[in-house]
Amino acid sequence: MIKKVLKSIIWVFYTLGTLLVAGLYIPYLLYLEWRGLRRRREEVAWSFARWWGRAVLAATGSRVTVRGKENVPPGPVVVMGNHQSCFDIMLVLGYIDKPLAFIAKKELARLPLISQWMKFLGCLFLDRRDVRQAAQVFQRAVEAVRNGWSMVIFPEGTRSRSAEMREFKKGSMKLPVRANVPIVPISIDGTYKVYEGNGSMIGSADITLTISPPILPKDYAGMGTAQLAQMVQQKVAGKLTAPVKV
């Protein structure tokens, strides 16, 4: 128990240190934005986010295996997968070789440094209780993807905090359908063991990220969102051993 506590404390201070380093980059990114060098700003922001995701996971002592990297196509996509843990964000940022933005809950917009970095990455903040605001965020997400951004969505809507996977929400499918872009299914296995399944202490785990071949717009043409959600979930579940919780 003492060992777990010490490891958790060390990890917290290490992560805070990486966030302080991130803070040092913000003036430079603001300068690039002021100069109109948006592409360069995006490259710097994503490169640091990729390093940060890997560094924070490595500090837990976890071992990451990635399968199917070649299945990420060029151009904008919507990445969809199961959501086991808060560490899924670090995993996706660190190990998928494409700049990615998230649709995140509005509470994260209040966090210093983190919220600023999320904005640089193109993330959008959603208030699920405000229907009008949610509709506006959705439209902005569609426009962003049409303009070349790639987005990540966890269709379960929340973390499972376990190996189980909940039913995918059909509303999540509207973004790729409206933007008419490929869906890249990803299967995340083991991240919950780092924190949620470890008594809310930081531990190490064997983590596997499997990237399945993309589902192209022609593959889901004519499908309803419920049918598409079922298809995506089957692709994700096919790389996992845990049951689907409905």
Image (cartoon, rainbow, N blue to C red):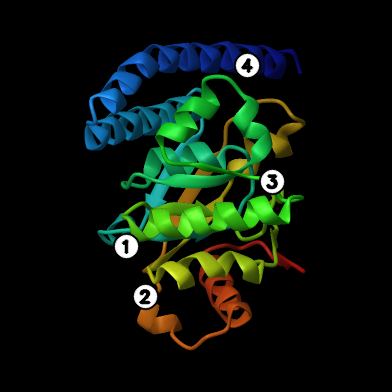
Q: How many marks?
A: 4
Whole-Å distance between the Cαs marked 1 and 3? 32 Å
Residue placed under numbered mark 3 in the picture: 127
Whether tag 2 and tag 3 are in contact, CB under 8 A, the answer is no
Relative to 165, does residue 15 appear above or below in the rendering? above
| Residue shown at 47% from the left, 73% from the top | 177
Mark 1 and mark 3 residues within 8 Å of each other at the beta carbon: no
Return the x and y of residue 173 as percentages of the image width and height.
55, 69
In x, y percent, where is residue 217?
A: 38, 77
Q: Nearer the viewer, mark 2 or mark 1?
A: 2
Task: Please state which amino acid type lies under the numbered disc 4.
Answer: Lys
Circle 4 residues within 10 Å: few <14, some 14–19, many ≥20: some
- Disc 4, disc 3: CB below 8 Å? no
Earlier-in-chain disc, 2 versus 3: 3
Q: Label 3 sits on what residue type?
A: Asp
Mark 2 lies on residue: 216
Q: Amino acid at mark 1?
A: Asn
